[in-house]
């Protein structure tokens, strides 16, 4: 998260929303692991970042999956300017998001869900810090 300047609470919220923290999760569209990375995306990101990648099996490894997912989310944020747009592109796919006239103007439920969970995590961390 520090390398890409991505808020760790965003990453945790994406993981919660995408897979409910289930490393072996597979979506109906074929996305795999904690951050529900598509195999083609995983291969592209791994090659781009010099990360060892053993096909779909790599996406079941939580460390590889999250590393790839964070890089991809950072790439989308750079491409689409805001985290809200990056989250929408992460969920819908960057091509579909880029072609859509309404997704960037009206954030989808997915984005709201991730941001709401991020806020919840931030509030909980503040409460825990106060108790310590």
Image: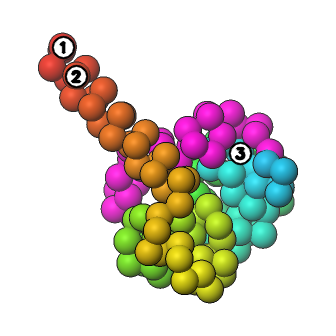
Name the secondary structure under disc 1: helix
- Colour scheme of the picture: rainbow
Q: Which quarter shows the N terminus?
A: bottom left
Residue 56: which quarter of the image?
A: bottom right
Name the secondary structure under disc 3: loop
Q: Which mark is residue 127?
A: 2
Residue in view at x 80 percent, y 45 percent: 26
Q: As rendered, which of 22 and 66 lies closer to the eye?
A: 22
- Residue reaching furthest to the left: 130
Tell me whether the residue at label 1 lies in contact with that at label 3, contact meaning CB atoms closer than 8 angstroms. Answer: no
Q: Is residue 108 in the magenta section?
A: no
Q: What percent of the width, then of the height, locates residue 25?
A: 76, 40
Q: Nearer the viewer, mark 3 or mark 2?
A: 2
Is 129 placed left or right of 4 in the picture? left
Q: Is residue 40 visible?
A: yes
Q: Which mark is residue 33?
A: 3
Q: Is residue 13 in the magenta section?
A: yes
Residue in view at x 49 percent, y 46 percent: 113
* Distance from Cα at disc 1 to Cα at disc 3: 33 Å
Judging by the rendered image, the residue that carries numbered circle 1 is 131
Q: As rendered, which of 54 and 120 lies closer to the eye?
A: 120
Q: As rendered, which of 6 and 115 lies closer to the eye?
A: 115
Q: What percent of the width, then of the height, locates residue 59?
A: 74, 51
The earlier-in-sequence mark between 3 and 2 is 3
The earlier-in-sequence mark between 1 and 3 is 3
Q: What percent of the width, then of the height, locates residue 92?
A: 65, 67
* Distance from Cα at disc 3 to Cα at disc 2: 30 Å
- The stretch in magenta equals 1-26
Check disc 3: other Cα within 10 Å, few if <14, some if 14-19, many if 20+.
many
Check disc 1: other Cα within 10 Å, few if <14, some if 14-19, many if 20+.
few
């Amino acid at each position: 998260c520090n390398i890409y300047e991505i808020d760790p609470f965003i990453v945790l919220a994406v993981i919660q929303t995408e897979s409910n923290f289930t490393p072996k999760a597979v979506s109906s569209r074929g996305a795999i692991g904690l951050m529900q990375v598509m195999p083609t995306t995983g291969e592209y990101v791994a090659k781009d970042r010099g990360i060892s990648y053993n096909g779909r099996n790599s996406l079941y490894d939580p460390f590889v999956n999250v590393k790839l997912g964070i890089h991809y989310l950072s790439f989308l944020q750079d491409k689409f300017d805001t985290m809200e747009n990056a989250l929408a592109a992460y969920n819908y796919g960057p091509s579909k998001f880029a072609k859509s006239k309404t997704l960037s103007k009206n954030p989808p439920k997915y984005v709201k869900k991730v941001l709401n969970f991020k806020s919840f995590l931030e509030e909980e961390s503040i409460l825990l810090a106060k108790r310590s």
